[in-house]
Structure formats: C-alpha cells, structure tokens
Amino acid sequence: MTYSTLETTLQDGVAVIWLNRPEIRNALSPELIAELTDAVGAASDDDAVRAIVIAGRGKAFCAGADLNWMKRASTYGPAENEADAVKLAELLRRIAESPKPTVARVHGPAFAGGLGLVTACDIAVASFDATFCLSEVKLGLIPAMISPYVVRAMGPRAAGRWFLTAEVFDGAEAYRCGLVQEIAAPEELDGAVNALLGHLVVAGPRAMAETKALIRDVAHRPVDDALMHETARRIAATRASDEGREGLASFLEKRKPRWHPGA
C-alpha cells in the first residue's frame, strides 16, 4: 500500500516504517496515525516479516502532535475529542500487541505522542543526540493515552517526575531510567539497530509471538500455583509445536532451523 505520511521497506525479514513528514518533524496527525496503524497491522500479519522498525525521516523521530490538529481538537466537544483520542490509543496498542518484535530507532526529538511510540515498542535504540519530553502539562493537558506504556517502560516514580516537570532530557537519561535499552553515537545508530535485528530475525517467529504474550500475561502477577501451572502448560505446548520440535532437532543436529534466514 502507498502512504502519504509514511515510507515503508521490507528487506531480509525486517519491515521498516519511516515516519515521513520531515518538514514538520514527523508530527502526529490523524492521517499519520491512521496510516501507521494500518502499516503496523499489515507488517504484523505478513509471514515474511520477522521484526518491525519504526523510524523517522529528517531531523526528528517525532516531535509530538501536529499544531493544526491540536487547534482543531481544541474546538471539539467531549464526545468528538474522545473519539479522536482513541485513534492514538489504538495505534499504541497495535504496536505493543504486535506478534512481531518492534524496535524504535530514535534520533532527534521524541516528544509527547512521539515518546509514546517509543515506549509502545518492545525495544528502543536511541542516538546520544536524541531528546525526550513529556510536554503535556505545560499545555494544560495530560499524557493520557501514552501513560500505560511510559509507566511500563520507566516505572511510576520516574515517569511521574518527567510527566510533572515536562523537562527535556537526553538519550543518556532515557537510557538510565529504562526508556531506551541502548544508546549509540549518531553515526553508529543504524549499526546498533542492525546488530539487534540480527538476533531477532533468527529466533522462532511463533516463539517470539508467544514470548511477547507471556511477558504481558505474567507481569506484576504473584508467583502462585495458578501462574506456575499456567507457565508449565505454555512450555509444554511450545515443546509439542512444530516450531518447538524443529528448534530442538536443529540444535541436536547442529544445523540451522528451517525458519533461519540462512537455512
């Protein structure tokens, strides 16, 4: 599909979705949100895709909401505002619940909703010159739709500091508080992302999807008998699956599994 706000590529099992509004720092608009929701969904459903990267063209990853969109939204009534806001919430959930591993490639500003995109991804890699800001309170707003993902990434105490102060912070601080998992020099950003993707594309596709679901389901649950038996059932099911049997056989036979790109 051809998009007006995105550029998409697929190579070696990796779908890269570029936010492509560099003239306004890839600001979020209803059209971009709709197209990104569609693109992530299409990549998630494509058996040829093993991992999804979200990146930004130009000098920014995503600088937050488009000013024209914000002006229009200020004239909406409560029901229209809620319907409008749900679209971003749906996009973030589509990214977070994709069965494929999702990676944010972050450079330049990642502000407000743009920071939400980063935290909705499974893994974030940022350049040292990336900047982050949860700017909503300075506009008399709240970081509502992105809050579940930011709190999950940072924890409530760290998130509370940045939510309430709306300060700009750098890649080193984003790494320190868990917002991103890896930082690199700007000229080494693509190398760092590609090294990570090298690990993702050789893992079992079904195993990765099941692992993502496992993380969501066990997070913050007590380790009781119910969880113990549930996890035992899950490993039993994967051991008995075609992918699980192939993975074990390939390991014992010292060969690459059938899903491996080099097999």
Image (cartoon, rainbow, N blue to C red):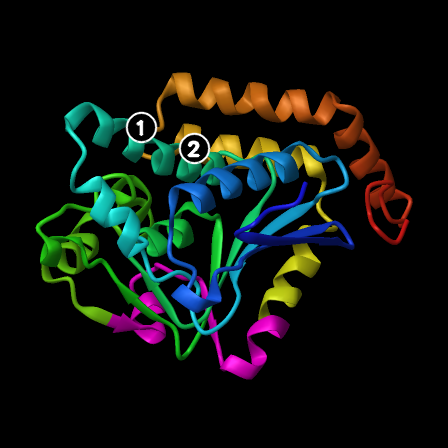
- Judge from the rendering whether residue 249 lies leftward or rightward of residue 107; answer left or right: right
The mark nearer the N terminus, 1 or 2, is 2
Tell whether position 173 is magenta.
Answer: yes
Where residue 245 appears, as percent x and y from the top left, is 80, 29
- Judge from the rendering whether residue 204 lies leftward or rightward of residue 146; answer left or right: right
On the image, which quarter does residue 131 sit in? bottom left
From mark 1 to mark 2, how far is it between C-alphas?
Answer: 14 Å
Q: Amino acid at mark 1?
A: Pro
| Label 2 neighbour load within 10 Å: few <14, some 14-19, many 20+ | few
Q: Amino acid at mark 2?
A: Arg
Residue drawn at (45%, 71%) of the image: 107
Q: Does residue 45 sit above or below 178 in this rendering?
A: above
- Judge from the rendering whether residue 151 lies leftward or rightward of residue 165; answer left or right: right
Tell whether position 129 is magenta.
Answer: no
Residue drawn at (33%, 44%) of the image: 149
Residue 222 has which mark? 1
Instruction: Say which residue label 2 marks.
Output: 216
Residue drawn at (61%, 26%) of the image: 235
Residue 62 has which mark? none
Residue drawn at (62%, 62%) of the image: 196
* The residue stretch that appears in magenta: 169-191
